Image (cartoon, rainbow, N blue to C red):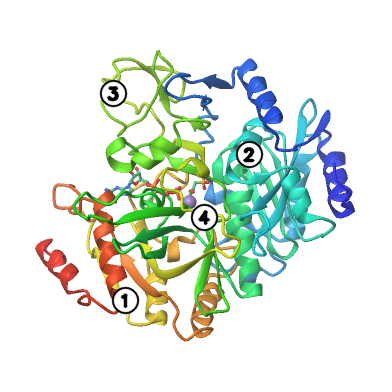
Amino acid sequence: MTGNSAVTTWVDECVKLCKPDKVHWCDGSDAERDMLTKMLLDRGEFQRLNEANWPNCYLYRSDPTDVARTEKVTYICSEKESDAGPTNNYLSPAQAQTDILPRYAGAMKGRTMYVIPYVMGPLGSPYSKVGFQLTDSAYVVLNMFIMARVGKRALDQLGSSADFVKGLHSIGELLPETRAICHFPERNEIWSFGSGYGGNALLGKKCHALRIASAQARREGWLAEHMLILGLENPEGKVYYIAAAFPSACGKTNLAMVIPPAALKGWRTWTVGDDIAWMRYGKDGRLYAINPEAGFFGVAPGTSAKTNLNALKTASANSIFTNVGVDENQNVWWEGLGPAPAKLTDWKGNPWTPDSPEKAAHPNSRFTTPASQCPSISPHWEDPEGVPISAILFGGRRASLVPLVVESTSWNNGVLIGASMGSEATAAATDTKAGTIRHDPMAMLPFCGYHMGDYFQHWIDMGKKVANPPKIYGVNWFRQDENGKFLWPGFGDNVRVLQWIIDRVEGKGEPSKPRLEICLANKT
Ligand code: GTP
Ligand code: SPV
Ligand code: MN
């Protein structure tokens, strides 16, 4: 409990509405985590993984109709429709009140309401934000324990302030037809109903740290972006930080913890964040970024010792695996991990063999894992002031046309590159057709909490704030030949592109010429 009356008044209102049997205030302790884990194991919702290979790791299968974000029922509920803009689904606050709120009435009968106080951003950072998520899903609580800094620490950070985000979440009956994710940017409020999955349900992530935060960032003069943050250290020991926006399932987690190829002697990378960056100008006129999250909610398929060893090592303990396959010895498996075991149980709980027509793991299956366990985690990943950004990348998944890398000629030209991004849809959202190209400006189409036109203006305004904003680049790791084979090796070799970008930042190297040659070789 807390003495903060702004918090308790709101929690009381939600309790009256949802009518839970019990209210549990999360303190974020190990004992609490163990208690919830045991409860899910006893209920059969969690399956313990092989203790030798995956210590303290669990498998969870979500409802098969609830496996990814649902953009069609994600709403921006600003006072004015014009503030939501043409790219967001709009519901007026009054309409949300009449259409959505009644779904919560008595929804938690027979259940416990968990109150999760959380901080997005490093503890004690002036740029961190406090939120509260009320939820009736213990699985969501355990994910939030990994993804955010939860419990007493958050109450301490908030003190008596009323500046916090209110998130009301109920899985309801997990019916797709009652599912709705509503955001009220003017009152820092989120209502999520009918889903227990990832970005729909872990409210600190997309709902708070992107949709609510982007609107707040515009009001306050900073940026909340769908970006990874990584440091690239050259052989002289100088570290350059890069922020990169790629749409969902287009390579952020991979680039954030990329291992340079052996040929690049003396180069190394440092991970700061893999999905979200909050950025603002420091007193020195440089753009500084913090990672608001404390964990990674990473795509499992395609993750292997060859493609992303650091992710595998990170997730090898104290992690939750959602919708992957599992073998008889309780080892997880997914497409791309390595040779398939002869026999598996698939993500739906059915028997599976390598001859089965279906995939063993859902294409959007995920691991939830503490960032602190990442072998490449930056010693500065929790610096309260953030890390200084030297370059910003915008990239998509494009089989044709878009070259490996282009350098913008100015900040505004870079904003144009970001704003005109297109990318092939992936399995990260259920209602988009995988493979079809959609316009996804700055990888923020599903996450911008306000009018996309105002968002572009805000980016342009941010460039006017300082004399030397970071250089902006467009990249594409996903060009294919006529047989559908990737033309660029990707993964570790992407560091070669970063190396060239760093040279350019230092005023060295040729403008895009070397890359142009690659494009020509690829029959641009
Ligand atoms: P979200 O968490 O949904 O925001 O996704 P993300 O951008 O972090 O995507 P992630 O790094 O998890 O990559 C998604 C998929 O793309 C995985 O299957 C990766 O194996 C694959 N991938 C990542 N980088 C590359 C690359 O350089 N080349 C190729 N061909 N595939 C890649
Ligand atoms: C994304 O879809 O961009 C993700 C996964 O990072 S989720 O948290 O489910 O939104
Ligand atoms: Mn994402």
Dot 3: few (<14), some (14–19), or many (≥20) neighbours within 10 Å?
A: some
Q: Nearer the viewer, residue 332 or 35?
A: 35
Distance between mark 2 and mark 4 Cα atoms:
18 Å
Q: Is mark 4 within 8 Å of ligand 1?
A: no
- Of callouts 1 and 2, which one flags the residue occurring earlier in the amino acid sequence? 2
For badge 4, the amino acid type reads Trp
Distance between mark 4 and mark 3 Cα atoms:
36 Å
Q: Which residue is mark 1?
A: 506
Secondary structure beneath label 1? loop
Q: In the figure, 35 relative to 494: above or below?
A: above
Q: Nearer the viewer, mark 1 or mark 3?
A: 1
Q: Is mark 2 within 8 Å of ligand 2?
A: no
Distance between mark 4 and mark 1 Cα atoms:
24 Å
Dot 1: few (<14), some (14–19), or many (≥20) neighbours within 10 Å?
A: few
Q: Quadrant of the N terminus?
A: top right
Q: Which residue is mark 3?
A: 340
